[in-house]
Image: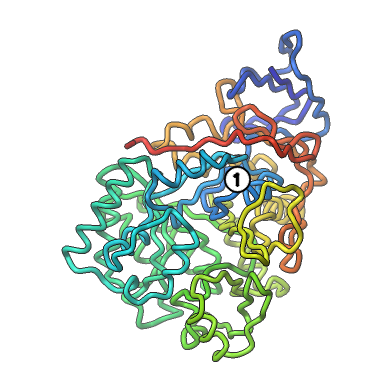
Amino acid sequence: MIVLRGGRVIDPGSGTDRVADVLVNGVTVHAVGTDLAIPAGADVVDVTGLIVGPGFVDLHSHVHSIAGQRLQAMDGVTTTLDLEAGLMPIERAYADAAADGRPLNYGFSASWGSARAQVLLGQQPQASMAAGLANLGDPGWQRSSSPTELAAWLRLLEGELGAGALGIGVLMGYAPRSDPDEFLAVARLAASVGVPVYSHVRELIEADPTTPIDGSEELVIAAAETGARMHHCHVNSTSRRHIDRVLGLLDRSRAEGSTVTVEAYPYGAGSTGVGAFFLAPDRLPHWGIRSSNIVMVESGERIATATRLAELRAADPGAECIVEFLDDNDAADRALLHRAMAFPDSIVASDAMQVVWPDGSRDTRQWPLPPGGRTHPRTAGTFARSVRRMVHDTAQWTWSEAFRRCSYLPARILDDIAPASRGKGRLGAGGDADLVVLDPEGFTDRATYTDPTRPSSGVRHLMVNGEFVVRHGELLIDAYPGRGLRGLLA
């Protein structure tokens, strides 16, 4: 048994915030209290002056790697899920992660993009994020489906749900000219089997008046018409300077009884494949950006001209890039990001990307990470940065509210589809021993756009399924206790 003694224990599930001991027995929390009987031989860890809470649950992470998960562990994350894009085939995704070993818990949605690519392009999915990025610029994947094709890829998605996928991930923003009836068909499928839809919405009407339907409107219409549980991914990056209108829309949808959830991250730049539809040179004005607002991840090249952007898109559409959609140094843009984070029940999610090294490798068991790795700083710093800005800088959140946004609310989205999530995001007897112990003054992000793999500081201990992944501030390189969360339909 392990005892975390004398810390400030925060349970966002019950709303408690008190000094207490936490007794961990195997993979669960055995007891929380001030007069616990400590078994002889227990491993007692003094956490006086530190905060003990449920580990953070990231609904939106594409790291799929030991290196990426270790960066997220140092950011307080114990469960990291790819629900926006997903992977296919789902059985292979889970098998690959289990065979490789994972420091953190993991899981995947059924990939709408991969199912459409299999039917529309005849391409067999490889359970690979890199393969999905490579498809982004292919017009054959972006087009609308015939009735026969639609039925075929819906069957594929239903099969993936039966194999344990955690809902359906829809990258609608990457095929924004496709028929809106297809999105409704996905929502109907999700509603019929009781799973969520996680959507990167298509373009907003302000950005593209010719869009078939406003992306955020499409999501709330689908929720109202089908009863499906709809999750709006990274509302900050898809809404950009129209965030207030979109948040108002989501608020009205909730008030009318729809189940609509939302996530955000605290950065003014996103990351994707350079071949994405919305990064075509002629599309950039719709986003209010220029080619110089795009930086290639692997090389660090800031794209100087539209001609150079076209060259890079043609050469390798899946190459990762950083896109500056808001200015982190501008007070008005920072206020927009703040409103996305402060929105009632907005969930923190990272949209973390894999680390890429100059030799093309995307993973390593070496720690500290080898020099030269490139990624978006959100991979290493999203949760610490969110806490710093919302708890320390602005006092918008209490510590209890921070754990509710980072742990409790994301776990609850999965309760009906993944029984294994029901013990997560809480800190009480019988809950999962996925715990983080933080230095309340020292927990902060250190990753930057120029030094993106610098781990956050202030995580003193991190436990996954009752096993230390971080202890006394040091990551344990032999710890691989992560388990896969599987869907209920499996």
Total tally of numbered discs in the picture: 1
Of residues 252 and 203, which is closer to you in this image? 203
Give the percent coordinates (x, y) of residue 201. Answer: 42, 65
State which quarter of the image contains the C terminus.
Answer: top left
Of residues 176 and 41, which is closer to you in this image? 41
Q: Is residue 328 left or right of residue 62?
A: right
Residue 77, quarter of picture: top right
Q: As displayed, is residue 207 above or below residue 218?
A: below
Q: Residue under label 1, please give it.
A: 406
Residue 255 can be seen in this image = no
* Mark 1 nearby-residue class (10 Å; few <14, some 14–19, many ≥20): many
Identified by mark 1, the residue type is Cys
Could you tell me which residue is drawn at 61 percent across and 78 percent down? 294
Residue 193 can be seen in this image = yes
Q: Is residue 116 left or right of residue 361?
A: left
Q: As displayed, is residue 2 above or below residue 167?
A: above
Give the percent coordinates (x, y) of residue 178. Answer: 30, 72
SS assignment at label 1: helix
Could you tell me which residue is drawn at 60 percent across and 62 percent down? 339
